[in-house]
Image: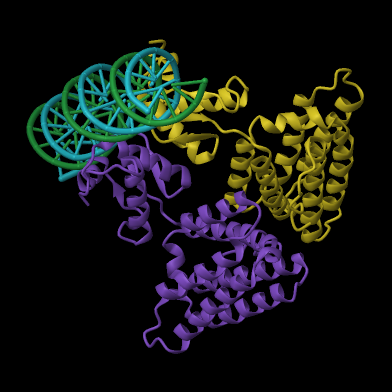
Chain colours: A yellow, B purple, C cyan, D green
Amino acid sequence: MTDVGAPATLSKSQQAYHWLKGQIANQQLTPGRRLVLGSIAAELGMSVVPVREAIRQLEAEGLVTYERNVGAHVSMVDENRYRASMQALSLIEAAATAMAARELTAGDLRRAREVNERMYAQLVDADPFDPHAFTALNQQFHAILYRRCPNARLVELVEAEWARLGNMRDSIFTFVPDRAGTSVAEHEEILGLIERGAPIDDIEQQLRLHRAGTLQAFLSRTLSEHATEGGTA
Amino acid sequence: MTDVGAPATLSKSQQAYHWLKGQIANQQLTPGRRLVLGSIAAELGMSVVPVREAIRQLEAEGLVTYERNVGAHVSMVDENRYRASMQALSLIEAAATAMAARELTAGDLRRAREVNERMYAQLVDADPFDPHAFTALNQQFHAILYRRCPNARLVELVEAEWARLGNMRDSIFTFVPDRAGTSVAEHEEILGLIERGAPIDDIEQQLRLHRAGTLQAFLSRTLSEHATEGGTA
DNA sequence: GGCCGGCGCATCGTATACGATCGTGGTCAC
DNA sequence: GTGACCACGATCGTATACGATGCGCCGGCC
């Protein structure tokens, strides 16, 4: 029993949910790791019931997988699933960003460019290139661009998918640092398109290509499987 | 309701989950309806715990909403959310179908055309036009076309979104029967594109237009709000 | 007559308890 | 030596029990 007392805001199920999600994001719980209800419950000072519920939620999100009478484990991000998710994300995010393009304010664009410049700075200054920080900035950049999408559901889907990829996304630039430079350049190009009021379709297309490029770089580094055509790009 | 006994294949949580999902799809449980744990548990002949888990899952899918210490109710499908979901679906499904186009067998196309012909038959023969049956066929038609999508995640997303729209999709053709004829014609056109080996992008575009048309018809019937541009179509 | 505070019911949230199932290691027969 | 069977421990699945919370009703006070 750690800090019972004031369940003022969050139910234990939700506590467990957020805790687990955090642990997974932080790589404290790595893919494949078994999640034993009893242990987690003990760790969090609660009974197993809330933990079960939390795990069900995470299962629905695809972060953990469950096997009857066996238990849960953090989802393995096998190459295929990762690629599929990434591709799906690129499609959805491209659409969301395209739809958001006309809604962006000057401030949004300024902030996006600012972030991109920080990415550039990272790229040239940071002596030990920090992929984690770089990826965080990358996410921030894209988030600014799609957030204004008038279709709230799309934004939800984008963010769910992003969560699903989870920590894996951290590792992209770890493996393909060369891609980072290209990304920054492409970001600038995207901003240009938006500012010039380019056709929505062009913006979407550009986004897809951008993502497909990143994915391709990642994949070619790992293994050259039969690549299922990066999107319809 | 009460066939306990052989938990051979499905855990009670899953039974509850599927039962609820079915009830919602069948309109037995209409949007806004309160879901009381105890009652459901009694109805299904189980205790509340599995029901809770089932509801959590449904919540994660967006089919029900939950409020702490108050309970769950079937999600209200307000106009906005519906439109957003439909638009998202159209985007994702268009992409999935486009990616599946090259994978379709002659048999697939034949079956799709068969379904479309049955839709046409419904349209001209069925004296009291049955929107429910028609919509079921519509779903079947599209399912055949996107199922072969090599990206499993996209298929998952499409089907999740479809579930999310739930019964609501049933009502589309209830309200806009005129749209039905157009749909059948557009279906044929889509099949033609696929058969001719049209560019993937064209197929995707066509799908988006098809969906956008349906959505537009639905929306214009209900109320003419500020329409947020049907996709990037 | 209308507003405010307390009581009780309905329902949820969580803990605990117990039966069911799976995985594993040891033993026996072949 | 190898394979199958059995017994055991670990863990899950569900039921039941009890405390906590929110909501509506009723009576008192202004």
* Tag count: 0
- Give how far across and how far down residue A138 sits, in percent: 77, 35
Q: Is residue B222 above or below residue B48?
A: below
- Give how far across and how far down residue A69 sits, in percent: 38, 32
Viewport quadrant of the C terminus of chain B: bottom right
Q: Is residue B37 above or below residue B141?
A: above
Q: Residue A8: in sight, yes or no?
A: no
Relative to residue B2, is residue B169 drawn left or right? right
Q: Residue at x 72, y 51 (%)?
A: A94
Q: Is residue A93 above or below residue A137?
A: below
- Give how far across and how far down residue B86 sits, in percent: 55, 60
Quadrant of residue A99 in the image? Answer: bottom right
Q: Residue A120: in sight, yes or no?
A: yes
Quadrant of residue B217 in the image? Answer: bottom right
Front residue (pair A65, A180): A65
Front residue (pair A201, C21): C21
Relative to residue A88, is residue A133 drawn left or right? right
Q: Residue at x 65, y 67 (%)?
A: B104
Front residue (pair B33, B115): B115
Relative to residue A116, is residue A81 drawn left or right? left
In the orientation shown, which residue stands out farthest toward the top?
A2
Q: Residue at x 68, y 63 (%)?
A: B103
- Give how far across and how far down residue B27 sits, in percent: 34, 61
Front residue (pair B207, C21): C21
